[in-house]
Image: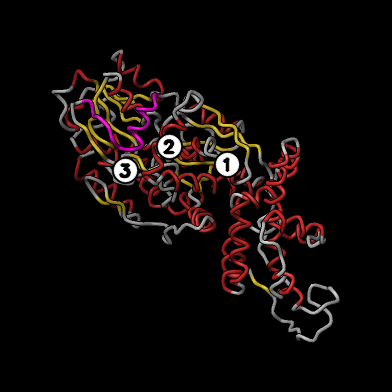
């Protein structure tokens, strides 16, 4: 944001830059005489006609981040420090600058105003104060002797009422918690969360246009975009839901027999979907034990909510599933945790927040806003001190429908493994929304390795750049005041090898030569 300084006015000028017939210094004298009470200040400013329609219209175009970082911190703290206490008190009484800006200029400001007028005088007074804090930021900026505001307008949201599909697993934590903890509301959105029964249902609903955005397993956007297992439908990703957060769980009858991957021979193993990190990580692990995942075991897709029951009745011997179902198997006395997925690949991706390209084209500003809500929520969830609060928020029937103790054990990393051991592993699941493009490279390499994608169709750079919108993710994180990585690719360190995205073909060949499959 830049302010024009190409006009200089002398102290003896009779016409002020604001257009009034008075000296420019009258503004500073006016500010010095302003009431100290925020509510009284707001009332006086309205009565004096300070806020013109043009100012409010301009304010409607200014992004919250630019307003916060440039106008507040630079304009007032540096250039007019004596007014900073007044502004801080205004913001405090309004409940925060974000609330003030949303109340005054958000897409639902009219509805908010109408609802507020139905309540008592305190609420009406609070609402007016919020509106005027936002307008005051603009008005006070004018008193600094600035003639122009040159801003990059992001535009209004094309759509504010959204339907987002999710599977009830802890990987979906940012999507789910953003509803009860009001992250969607903070970014001007009214979201209906739609609980889906399976990943097949998520995929089919996405292709049919029944949802605005969706919770997907990280390989799914690649598979769907390329038409693997379904009609080709371009999907884009600008934020991850989670990293880590899965486990290999084995039925209790095998407690004394399974020590490593070779011991899984002959097992029926459940994974949530063919195009999932679960399937790819499971195959990676089994191959290390000399097993061919296509001939030495049977891998079956099982909807996560059905997995514990399927294990209990003997339909599956083991599973690599998302939580909370690994912990639920322990809770129900059905199985034990053999290995956390983070021990196969620390920081591996699991689920992503996705939308179709056609929807993004029609709702580009909304796509930015909803991803900012997810990135914002993920940042909150990444702080271990918030995990118990989040577990309570996402456990109820309309979301995960799981015992709070089970969800808390997963999110805090304080859990029992079903073998009599207690653990405290805070990053059992973690939340880093940055979509490293090296994640996509590894996924593509394993699709090729297991003949799920032909080598001729594996255009790593093109596929990745089309689907993983890492540059946009970085931009949105910075708008939220975060400090995301500046790189798109990195070398990934797994339990049994290291993946260099600069040569994925060599990586596949080395795997086959080392493990024979």
Which residue is under mark 1? 184
Q: Residues within 10 Å of mark 1 (few under 14, many from 20)?
A: many
Say which element carries label 2: helix
Give the image location of residue 312, x and y in percent.
30, 15
Magenta segment: 403-418
Tell whether position 409 is magenta: yes
Say which element carries label 1: helix
Residue at the left extreme of this rendering: 256
Residue at point 69%, 42% (across, down): 122
**Which picture quadrant has residue 422?**
top left
Give the image location of residue 1, x and y in percent.
63, 68
Residue at point 24%, 38% (across, down): 517
Q: Relative to 189, is 436 above or below?
A: below
The Cα atoms of the two marked residues, 3 and 2, are separated by 17 Å
Circle number at residue 389: 2
Say which element carries label 3: loop
**Which picture quadrant has residue 88?**
bottom right
Residue 374 appears left or right of 3? left
């Amino acid at each position: 944001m830049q302010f024009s300084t190409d006009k200089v006015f002398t102290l003896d000028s009779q016409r002020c830059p604001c257009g009034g017939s008075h000296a420019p210094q009258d503004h500073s004298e006016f500010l010095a005489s302003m009431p100290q009470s925020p509510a009284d200040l707001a009332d006086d400013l309205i009565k004096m006609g300070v806020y013109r329609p043009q100012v409010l219209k301009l304010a409607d175009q200014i992004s919250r981040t630019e307003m916060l970082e440039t106008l507040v911190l630079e304009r007032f703290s540096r250039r007019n420090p004596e007014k900073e206490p007044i502004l801080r008190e205004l913001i405090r009484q309004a409940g925060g600058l974000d609330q003030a800006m949303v109340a005054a200029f958000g897409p639902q400001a009219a509805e908010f105003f109408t609802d507020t007028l139905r309540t008592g005088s305190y609420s009406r007074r609070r609402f007016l104060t919020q509106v005027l804090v936002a307008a005051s930021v603009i008005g006070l900026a004018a008193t600094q002797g600035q003639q122009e505001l040159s801003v990059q307008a992001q535009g209004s949201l094309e759509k504010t009422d959204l339907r987002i599909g999710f599977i009830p697993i802890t990987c979906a934590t940012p999507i789910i918690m953003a509803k009860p903890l009001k992250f969607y509301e903070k970014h001007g959105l009214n979201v209906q969360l739609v609980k889906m029964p399976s990943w097949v249902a998520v995929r089919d609903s996405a292709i049919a246009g029944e949802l605005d955005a969706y919770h997907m397993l990280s390989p799914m956007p690649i598979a769907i975009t390329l038409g693997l297992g379904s009609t080709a439908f371009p999907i884009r990703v600008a934020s991850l839901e989670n990293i880590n957060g899965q486990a290999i769980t084995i039925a209790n009858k095998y407690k004394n027999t399974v020590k490593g991957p070779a011991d899984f021979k002959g097992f029926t193993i459940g994974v949530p979907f063919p195009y999932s990190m679960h399937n790819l990580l499971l195959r990676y692990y089994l191959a290390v034990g000399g097993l061919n995942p296509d001939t030495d075991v049977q891998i079956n897709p099982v909807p996560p909510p059905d997995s514990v029951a399927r294990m209990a009745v003997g339909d599956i011997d083991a599973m690599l599933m998302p939580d909370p179902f690994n912990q639920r198997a322990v809770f129900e006395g059905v199985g034990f945790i053999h290995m956390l997925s983070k021990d196969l690949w620390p920081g591996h991706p699991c689920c992503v927040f996705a939308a179709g390209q056609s929807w993004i084209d029609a709702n580009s500003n909304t796509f930015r806003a909803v991803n900012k809500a997810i990135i914002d929520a993920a940042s909150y969830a990444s702080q271990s001190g918030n995990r118990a609060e989040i577990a309570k928020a996402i456990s109820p029937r309309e979301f995960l429908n799981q015992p709070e103790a089970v969800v808390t054990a997963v999110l805090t990393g304080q859990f029992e493994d079903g073998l009599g051991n207690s653990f405290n592993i805070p990053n059992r699941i973690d939340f880093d929304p940055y979509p490293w493009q090296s994640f996509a490279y590894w996924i593509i390499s394993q699709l090729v390795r297991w003949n799920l994608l032909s080598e001729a169709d594996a255009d790593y750079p093109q596929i990745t750049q089309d689907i993983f919108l890492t540059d946009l993710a970085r931009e949105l994180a910075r708008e939220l005041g975060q400090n995301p990585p500046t790189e798109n690719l990195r070398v990934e360190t797994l339990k049994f090898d290291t993946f260099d995205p600069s040569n994925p073909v060599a990586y596949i060949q080395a795997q086959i030569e080392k493990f024979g499959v």
